[in-house]
Image (cartoon, rainbow, N blue to C red):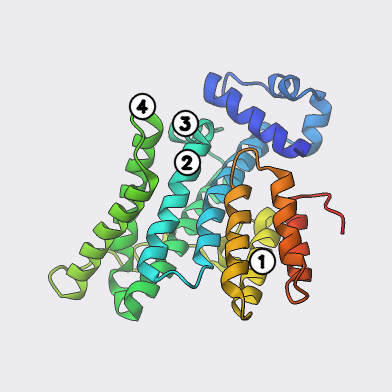
Amino acid sequence: MDKRKAILEAAVELIAEKGYTHTSMQQIADSVGVSKGSLYTFFPSKEDLIISIYEHYQQLVFERAFVVGLDGNLPPYERFAKQFQVQFEGILEYKAYMKMHMRGESAQSSEKLEGMGHRMRGRLFSWLERNLVELYGDEIEPYKWDLMWMTQSIYTSYTGLMISSENELAPDQLGKHIVRQIDILAKDYLAGKSNPLLDDEMMRPFSVGMDREGAFTSFEKRENAWKSLYESIHQLDQSHYYLEVTDRISEESRKSNPDEIVMRGLFQLLKADDELNEKAQILEMQLLPGSEH
């Protein structure tokens, strides 16, 4: 594990246990086995550290949905449900972070923190909007904000329940349940049985320009690598086989402790094809820093 990731994971565990205010940079440095000065070379301030934590873990959860969204073999309705499913699996995987997040552990409000919150909301709304348009077409445009706002509330409520309840909800059932509720609401609007309350002007403070599809900068190369590989696979005659291999890489990569040997073996299968070799190498270097070819 690289040092930056180790610091983020150690900080999450400490903050989830002690709270933001009662966790010092010295304690975090000690838990990772680095000097306090070394810690500040990665994160200039405690505020920068907490922002990095939020962005790192939210992106890990969203990257799961992003990769599932690249699977053109799944019908839009099933793909949307699967995207919810893998996010909820991530929420269970990163419980310490989610507990910290739900408790609102953070520094005092600042321009940096507000910017982070804006990007996080934009990331969620951009993803929801893309899926709504795929499912219902442009006709859903006048109703999208009401649907996205209600979906955000449902998503947040179930997230809180998942990390606080001893009886874990099944992510696959929950994904299907949420998409079914969205479908009921959307069809109600489209049938003219309900009128929207929200519009673009009213929701401007919650929108964000989604160039790069909202990816946080540190993950932009990873998302581009995933997208490029999937696009190349879809052009092959044996796409089903290579999609299965790539899906296995995706499943392994989203574990807390991925098996590097398994991932390298799967990448070898992709690199055996001349059409995929270069794209597979690029993704491998993103997921397994230090990869040599």
Q: Secondary structure at mark 2?
A: helix
Residue at label 3? 99
Q: Which residue is mark 2?
A: 91
Mark yes or no: residue 114 visible. Answer: yes
Circle 2 Cα neighbour tier, 10 Å, few/some/many (<14 / 14–19 / ≥20): many
Sequence order check: which comes first, mark 2 or mark 4? 2
Q: Tag 3: residue type?
A: Lys
* First in residue order: circle 1 vs circle 3: 3
Separation (CA) of disc 3 from disc 4: 14 Å
Q: Residue 292: give x, y in percent of width and height.
A: 87, 55
Q: Position of residue 95 (x, y in %)?
A: 49, 33
Give the CA separation, mark 3 to mark 2: 10 Å
Provide the residue designation for mark 4. Answer: 166
Contact? badges 3 and 4 (CB < 8 Å): no
Q: Which image quarter holds the C terminus? A: bottom right
- Nearer mark to the viewer, of 2 and 4: 4
**CA separation in Å, label 4 and label 1:** 37 Å
Given the image, on which type of amino acid does mark 4 rest?
Glu
Q: For residue 76, what is the image quadrant? A: bottom left
